Image (tube, grey):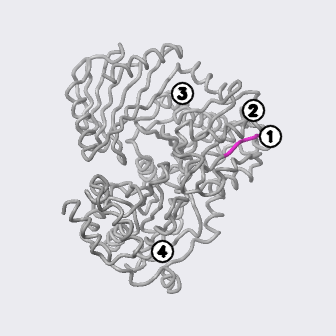
Amino acid sequence: MDYTERYQFWCNANLPEDVKAELASVKNDTEELKSRFGSDLQFGTAGMRGIMGMGSNRLNRYTVRRAAQGMAAWLSGTDLPKKAAIGYDSRHHSQEFAEVCAVAFAEAGIEVWLYDRLAPTPMLSYAVRSLNCGCGIVISASHNAGAYNGVKCYGPDGCQMTDEPAAVVTEKISQIPYFIPETMSFDAFMEKGMIHYICQDVWNAYYDTVLAEAVNPEMIATAGLNIVYTPLCGTGNEPVRHILGKLGVNISVVKCQKHPDGDFKTCEYPNPETDAALNESYKVAKQVPCDVILGTDPDADRVAIAVPDGDGFRKLSGNELGCLLMDYILKARTERKDLPEGAEVIRSIVSSPLADRIAERYGVEMKAVLTGFKYIGGEILRLEELGQENRFVFGFEESCGYLKGTYARDKDAVVASMLVCEMAASLKLQGKTILNALDELSDTYGYYLAYVQSIELTGADAMEKAAAIMANLRKTTPDAIGGAKVTEVKDYLSSVAKNCISGEESEILLPKSNVLEFILGEQGSIIARPSGTEPKVKFYYTTVGKTKEAAQTLLDACKAQMAQ
């Protein structure tokens, strides 16, 4: 069907009056019709994410129900436990969509465990494992703007769904008609005992598990640590404050961002990667004692920090915080002599290689995996299957995602917030700041600068444009970038790494992915990859210099050349 046929199909369906009114309102808007009905919203390893509204290419109760029916059909055809865990965030319709999913599973004879209130994504990952479920779903669009929502899908290990089961779910969805009426209501399935609320005991067990991941928690109360915290109107308020309160942190909450708000009125783009996400926090931090500003995204799987710097504040990048936390954990455990034999840390390939130098210093193995925390979760699963999960010490992504512990298989802003406070308290007791610790890393390893450039694409052929950019880069590999010689090119799609000096080729032992990496000897690298969820191509720059000025000069030159 083309977009006009899909639109007419929806108009002819027996739908509620408010839905028909919304459909009628776009009848004469060709571009809007193409946008809403030009295709079906795609399901992938990250589930589905899109703008909320009526249409086959929008997130609504009908597209969500169809996706959940596909998940249920997949689970029914496996040997996995016929149980599913479901959580949701603070976005508009999140609770409604969670209940829609619960009904779809219950109709298929699958027992459902649903959080009774807002819960962070890592708590859903924990619940899947804790309750021995065959799969899980979180209704969230993570850090996207308020117009978006999504369906994040998890496997039995609590990790985001991998390619093979996602392909089966996609096939199942394609066979399911739209608008199949529900056989029973949500309340009826609750009464029947097919849907249960997750009890407080699971929350408490999660809290105890997170607290057990502390390294030296007693330092926090001793240091008298003061933080300003914003949950960015999302799910972090209850769990983050509970954990930090238990440890004696003095917390000032950003009141205008304390309570759930699907419109995110005080932060249009609630992504803690951006400096603007902490604007309201900066105002509060000027009025109260503050050692650290903490901000978690709406589903509380990412955390960012800022610290006082002169008359203002300095926001740290995800790479900087990841390397600081890794160094803190490895140093403390080395001093205690409790690092496990074969200890392993994990980063994504687009995260700072400074982490490799830190791991090397402590004699710890570094594993670099593809972008997406599911690959970090997959490596933890591999260790678990070997009976060696204690070897995992820490994992992070440059996009502000961190995990210590194996209780969850997704990034967790709750445990990361605790570790940030512990690290800050340790430094405060030494008469140091987090910025002092950053300087010490640079003095030890050199200056590593990182920059992420996103090329956003528009139009119905946006994804094709992204593919063309990647194809062109493969055809026209430069000899040098920013004056630094390209010494190696890694093509993760062909799984080939080519040494540009010797011409020798070697195999990349990672799953195939549309990623290109240009290595500039010891001076850094540039990685290009199309986004998996949005029509954009991202470029990840790393430059290394003996001084910050040298690293910045090279970074500026690389950005200028790539812009051409």
In the rendered view of the protein, which quadrant contains the C terminus?
top left
Q: Residue at x 50, y 63 (%)?
A: 94
Vertical comparison of 207 with 202: above or below: above
| Residue at mark 4 | 112
Q: Nearer the viewer, mark 4 or mark 3?
A: 4
Q: CA distance from mark 4 to mark 3?
A: 47 Å
Q: Position of residue 208 (x, y in %)?
A: 66, 58
Chain-order first, disc 4 or disc 3: 4
Q: Is residue 342 visible?
A: no
- Is residue 493 within the magenta segment? no
Whether residue 223 appears in magenta in the rendering, the answer is: yes
Q: How far is the residue under mark 3 from the one under mark 1?
A: 31 Å
Q: Crowding at label 4, few (<14), some or many (≥20) Cα neighbours within 10 Å?
A: many
Q: Residue at x 30, y 72 (%)?
A: 178
Name above or below for residue 60 compared with residue 249.
below
Q: Nearer the viewer, residue 326 or 280?
A: 280
Q: Secondary structure at mark 2?
A: helix
**Which label's residue is closer to the chain start, 2 or 3?**
3
Q: Using the image, tell me which numbered label, if any, was put on residue 428.
A: 2
- Whole-percent x and y of residue 324? 59, 33
According to the picture, the residue beneath numbered tag 3 turns out to be 361
Mark closer to the observer (3, 1): 1
Looking at numbered disc 1 in the image, what kind of residue is underneath it? Gly
Element type at mark 1: loop
Three-letter code, disc 2 = Lys
| Among the two numbered marks 4 and 1 on one chain, the one whose residue lies closer to the N terminus | 4
At label 4, the amino acid type is Val
Residue extent of the magenta highlight: 222-229
